[in-house]
Image (cartoon, rainbow, N blue to C red):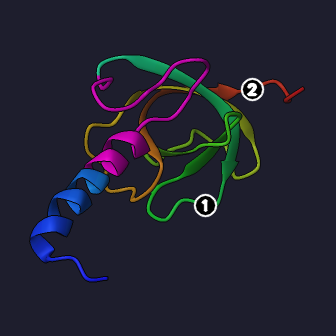
Amino acid sequence: MRYPMKTLLPILLLALAALALGGGTAAAQNENPGQGDENRSVRVTGVLTDEGVECPALRGDDGQIYTLTPRDLQGFEVGDRVAVVGKVAEISFCQQGTTLEVQKITAAKPAL
C-alpha cells in the first residue's frame, strides 16, 4: 500500500518532534534535566566512560549517558566513580547524551 507524501510528511514531522522532545530528557538523582532546565543545577552520580565521541562521558547510575564540558576532569579518569553538579547545556557539540556544563566534580562513594 502506497501513501502520498502529503500524508506521510506530517506524520514524520510529528514523530521527529516527539523524538527530539523525549530524547533530550534524562533522569538525574530524581530530577529530570532536559529542555528548559538550562539555568537549574542538577547532580548526576556515575562512572566516567570512554563512550564520548567529542566530550568526556559519564554513565549515570540511572543508565543514561551524559557528556561533560569543559573537558577538564580535574584529574579524574575513565573508570572513576564521580558526582557531577552542573547545568544542562542548551547547545552542545558533544553529539550524544545529555550534556552537562560541569560546575563541580568530586569522587563519589561506591554504588550499593
Secondary structure under the numbered disc 2 in the rendered image? loop
The circle drawn on residue 108 is 2
Residue 29 forms part of the magenta stretch = yes
Q: Give the camera-side residue of 26 and 44.
A: 26
- Residue at horizontal 64 percent and vertical 60 percent from the top: 50
Does residue 109 appear in this view?
Answer: yes
Secondary structure under the numbered disc 1 in the rendered image? loop
Q: Quadrant of residue 7?
A: bottom left
x%, y% of residue 42? 48, 21
Q: In this view, does 87 lie to the left or right of 111?
A: left
**Magenta residues, start to end:** 17-38
Residue, far left: 6
Q: In this view, does 78 lie to the left or right of 8?
A: right
Amino acid type indicated by mark 2: Ala
Q: Which residue position is annotated with label 1?
A: 51
x%, y% of residue 53? 49, 65
Question: How far is mark 1 from mark 2, CA to CA?
Answer: 20 Å
Amino acid type indicated by mark 1: Glu
* Principal secondary structure, stretch drawn in magenta: loop
Q: Say which of marks 1 and 2 sits in front.
A: 1
**Does 69 sit above or below residue 102?**
below
